[in-house]
Each structure stands twice: as structure tokens, then as C-alpha cells.
Amino acid sequence: MPSVLLTESLALELGDRTGNSIPAHEPWPQDVKLFQPYEVEQILLPDNANCLAVQTFLKMCGLDFEVEQRSNAEYMSPSGRVPFIKCGAFLIAELDPIISFVNNKGISLSDKMDNAQKADMRAYMSLVNTVLANAELYITWCDKTTLQEVTKPRFGSVLPWPLNHVIVWQKRSQVVKKLGVLGWAHKTLDEVYQEVENCCNALSVRLGNQPYFFGDRPTELDALVFGHLFTILTTPLPNNRFASIVRGYSNLIDLCKLVEKEYFERTAES
Amino acid sequence: MGTVHAKDKREPYPHDTEQQQIHLDGVKVRVDKINVDGLSRTKDDIIIATVKDLFQAKDFQEVILCAQKVRGKLEGLGCFRNIGIFIDTSSGPGATPEGLEVTFHVRELKRIVGGVNTLVGNNEGSLAVGMRMPNLFGRGEKLHTEYSYGAKKTSAFTVSYTKPLRGSLSPIITGTVFQAGSEWPWSGYKQIERGLLIDFGFNSAPWIRHNLQWEGAWRDVSCLTRSAAFQVREQTGPSLKSSVRHILLLDRRDTAILPSSGSLVKLTQELAGLGGDVGFFKNDLCLQGNWTLLPDMVLQATLQAGFLTRISNNLNVSICDQFFLGGPMSLRGFNTRGVGPHKDGNALGASAYWAGGLHLFTPLPFNPGKGGFGDLFRTHIFINAGNLGNVYLGQEIPTSLKAYTKTTRLSYGMGVTLRLGQMARVELNYCIPVLFQREDQPNPGVQYGIGIHFL
């Protein structure tokens, strides 16, 4: 009897997987939507970088999607972070889960790469995710001038008084707590800029003279780096030292220009 | 002495007849003095204002009736535990020949009263820890705090301050700070509400109570599970409601739970959108009538209806403002919130509803435990009807109303109800839904409900 039960439960699990989990061979649907906060008046530097990275990744894969801007995108997201995509009945939030979701459909930017390159790419992506993303959070929420002049007005723009003050304060304490756990909260601004400098240096060395990080074809790493660097370069902040550090690396700037030309200007024309 | 002699001659039982003959309203008296004994922190001015009507009494009957009335008023102040009345002829300097002296013996409530109790709310039990500070500043003010934790993981916190004002309309001002969390698995969301409520209550006629309220509430709606319907997900996030409300209540029922006679009218109007980002105008009406047809056989008819309309395109209406229908305490024979628009199994609510119920309550068959435990039980047969849907104002009224009338839901059944104290009631019913729509979630069979407000 136990063996029969086991087979049954296995069959059930398999059935579940095919029934509920990501359908492997289903084509990319037409009505995929990417949800993010309002770009002009609401979105903040770290969120904008993540949203742009996901958009770039989907465009690099040649997948159609529509951007939907919602003031409550962050609350709608199943993980509490933006962006998230709605693909049929599935909701997938943030870049990494979206990458694996797309991979499950048989679409990948890195399938031609060998294992060593893949591991290399993963390492650099994790570098960007830890250093640049945390530096963006630090500038946005811990730097007093940026917090007062940029973060508060933008984050509170979609909220009625007095919630705009209360929720900004709530969100700030969440971010500070998170940075504290990661050991970033007690850094000085100069230390943060130094980290960014180191990260950009490492990326610049890896890129060298190639058009993309791994040769002629863009990868997930290119999408991620573009998302962060382009946002850093184009977001006006009271203190633009962040952008000027990035500007010091001409090959990274070239990468941004290339990705923008290939994937964003073309769609703007059509 | 002469009178005694005369009485003896006239009647064999002088004592009895004398008692019958005395008309209390014929005894002219004057209230010279009122003593209130046992006051320590209650302020004199409110006591004087409460008892001074007694000086108007002209004869002994008036004195007794008036003293009872004053006792009721003193109890109403919420400062005293028990009140005794003592009437004597007045003596001492300044006493008039027909003078009386009325003494109220009072015992003040303790400064601080606390308790742990279990509550039965609408379909949920919870544990509450409360503390009350009655008569805080000596004029009937009351500070009340309560924390409760529910069986369905809802937690709530309230601090309220009540101050009775002087005047014939018995006005009371209450300010409340609250936090309440609730989960609505039928709609796939949970909600945390924090806010401030200011209430001004007064009577416009002896039985008619008005409450004027302002409420500012910060509501945080979030999805309960990953599988919540996208239409619910779209409405998540914080919102701020600032609204004024008027509640009119006319309650002539003999008791709130399982009444045998009397009627209830409750009309609530709420206008949201004075600040905040939520705006609507909401009307809610509840009518109930009770008639005793035969001894112990009570017919109850209830009608509820509500309508919500947006007031501006810039202001939102959240899912937590909508009306819902269905469930053991609402339209029986359906799941909780089981009537009306659904998406992926989640009730979305709608802007208009009506529901009616006709119940016939009788004692248990063969009346076991009559005069005691058995009196807590009633059997009832019922028929419930109602509808929930979106009604739009303007040109679409005829079409939306037509659709509305065509889709009435109906159920009937019978069951047993149990009265829990004077507050709550438990019902166990067998229900048969008769008319329902495709999107509904009918629930034929046994249904169990516990709560305060029933249809």
C-alpha cells in the first residue's frame, strides 16, 4: 500500500507541475504587461534602475510587452518590489525571477555561453545587485539632501496629506533597516562613492573593448548594467557625483549608448 | 386623637381604607433640601444640574416620580455604582411646614476598571483586554482603551474619550483613536485601518438618536495570498478616507436580540472626500419590524438596502468601501460575500444592494426547559431575498435597474437560534438557495452563523 500511495502522490505532484507551474512550451502571450510606478513624477532611482533593467532584458529577448504605470505598483507586486510582469495568469516580480520565467519558455540570452562564462556573468550580476543597487538605495534614502529634495516629494506625490509624510517615514525606516543588515547603513557618503568607483572599475575592466560584456551579443548582465548606469546618468540629483563617477568610464558610457540606440531608439521610431 | 376615634366608629378595618383613601398627589409638599451623600470626586455642578428638577415637585406623588427620574439621570452620568433614595420631612432652620428633604445615597465607581473578556463579533470570536477610567474629571468623562485579538488573526486597538454635555437632548461627544485589522478571505484581501473618529450624539425626540461623525482613516489593503484576483490586487495599497457621517436611529424594539415586538429604523449617510483620496456618497438603510402573532410566535420582517455613488473621477472607491452580500448573517444559503460580482473566486463587491428577510420564530418543539435554559432557544423558518450589483447613475439607470430586478436571489430554510446574553446570537440553519446567478457561490445545506447583526 505505501508504494501505491507514493506513486499516486508523485503523479499528483507531476500533474500539479504541469497544471499550475510555468507552461514550458506555451508561446509568449500577446497581452504581457509590465507594471511600474509613474516614470515622470513618482519613480525613485533604485526602482527606476530595476524597471529599466527588466524592460531592457525583455527587449533584448525580442518579447513584446506593454508598460503600465500605476501609483500603487509597489503594493500590487507579489514580492512588494517593482517591476512585475503579468503574463496570462502569472505575476512575476523582479529581474531574476523574470529571467528564469523567460528561460522556461525556451528563450535565453546566455544559452550560447559555456558554464564558466555563465558563472562569470552571475558573479558580475551579483556585484551590480549588491553594490550599485545598495548605493542607489543609500543615496535615495540615507543622504539627507536627496531625501528632502528628491525622495520625499517624488515618493509622496501620489499620496494624500498626511500619508505622504507617514509612509515616506515608514518606507525610509524599512530601507535603513535593510541597509543596516547588509552593513551599508553606517557607511559615509564617501565610502559609498568609493564602492561605486570600485564596482564601475571592475565592470569597465571586464568590458574592455568589446561592444557587450560577452562579445557581440547582449546578455542579462548587459541589461542589468544598462538599467543601473543609464538611470544613474539620467536622473537629476542634488549631488551629481554619482553620475560623474560613471562618466569617468568611457567604455561603460559607450555600452549605454549602444544599448539605447539598439533597443530604445528603434522602438521609438516604429 | 379625635380623628382616630371617628375612624374607629366608621370602619372595621380603618388601616386598609385609610391607605386606599390617601391620594399622594393630594399631599402638598415642598422640597426644601436635596442631599447627595457619597460624593468624592464628582463635581457639584453636574449633580446640581441633574437633581434640581426635583425642586419643581409640588405634591408627594411628583416627588416620588421625579426622584426616580433623577435617579435614572444620575445612573446615566456613568459615575455611580448604586443609588438609593431616602425621603424624610425636613427639619432644622429654614424648614417649611410641608417641607421634605430628599437624600440620594450614591457610591462612586472606582477610578480604574479593567477586564479581560472574550467577545463574539460578527462571525468571529476574539479576546479583549480592556481598561476603563470612568468619571475621569468628575463630570462623567470616560476614557476607555481596549486591545483585542481575534480568532482570525485580526487585532484591534481603540482608545476613546467620552464627554457628556449638559442639555435636554443628552448630547455626548466621543473621540476615538483606533486601529483595526481584518482579513477577508472571501475577497482575497486583508486590511489594516488606523484612524480617528469624532462623534457627536444627541436625541431630537425621546426615541430618535442622531450621531454626527467625522472619520479620518488610513486604510492599508493588501492581498491575502498570491492567488488573489488581479482586480483585487489593483486596489491594494494605502488610501486615506476623510468622511462625515450621519446616523439616525429609531429603536422601539423590546430587546436587541430576538425581540418580540417593536421596530427599528436605522439610516446611515456617509460622504467621503473632504480631504484624502477616497470619495463617495454612501447611503444605508435598515428597517425591522417584529410582531407577536400568537403567544411565543414572533414574525420578523427585515429590509436592508444600500447605495454608493462616486462623487468625483479623481477620488477612488476602494474594495473595502463597497457593499457585499451573502453569508449566514446576511443572505442565508450563500457563502459569505457569495452574491454578486466575483473574479477568480474573490468577491469584488458592488455599489448597490438590497436584502430582505421574513422570519417566523417559535419556541423549541414541545418546549423543553421552559422558563429557563430552553427560553434561550428559538426555532425559525425563514425566507431571504436580495441582490447585489452595480447601479450607475445617469443615462444608464434604466438598463442597470432592469438587470438588477431580473437577478433577484432567493433562499429559504429553517433552523435553531440561540441567544447569547443580550448581545449576540448563534444560528444553525438548513438553507436551500432557490434563485441564484452563475457568478454566485450558493451554499445549500447546513450553515452556521454567530454574530450581532443578522438579516
Image (cartoon, coloured by chain):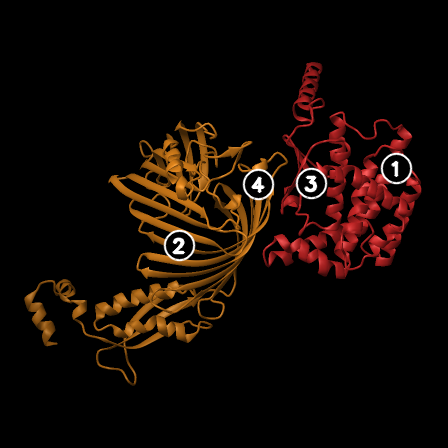
Task: Determine which residue is flagged by label 3.
Answer: A79
**Chain letter for the red colouring in the rendering:** A
The residue type indicated by label 4 comes to Tyr
- For this view, does B141 lie left or right of residue B13? right
Task: Determine which residue is flagged by label 4.
Answer: B189
In the image, which is nearer the foreground, mark 4 or mark 3? 3
- Structural distance between the alpha carbons of marks 3 and 2: 41 Å
Furthest-left residue in this view: B10
| SS state under label 1 | loop
Q: Nearer the viewer, residue B209 or A75?
A: A75
Instruction: Mark 4 and mark 2 in contact? Answer it, CB < 8 Å.
Output: no
**Chain letter for the orange colouring in the rendering:** B
Q: Is residue B130 visible?
A: no
The chain that hosts pointer 2 is: B
Task: Determine which residue is flagged by label 2.
Answer: B247
- Structural distance between the alpha carbons of marks 2 and 1: 68 Å
Picture layout, residue B171 above or below residue B189? below
Q: Nearer the viewer, residue B73 or A66?
A: A66
The chain that hosts pointer 4 is: B
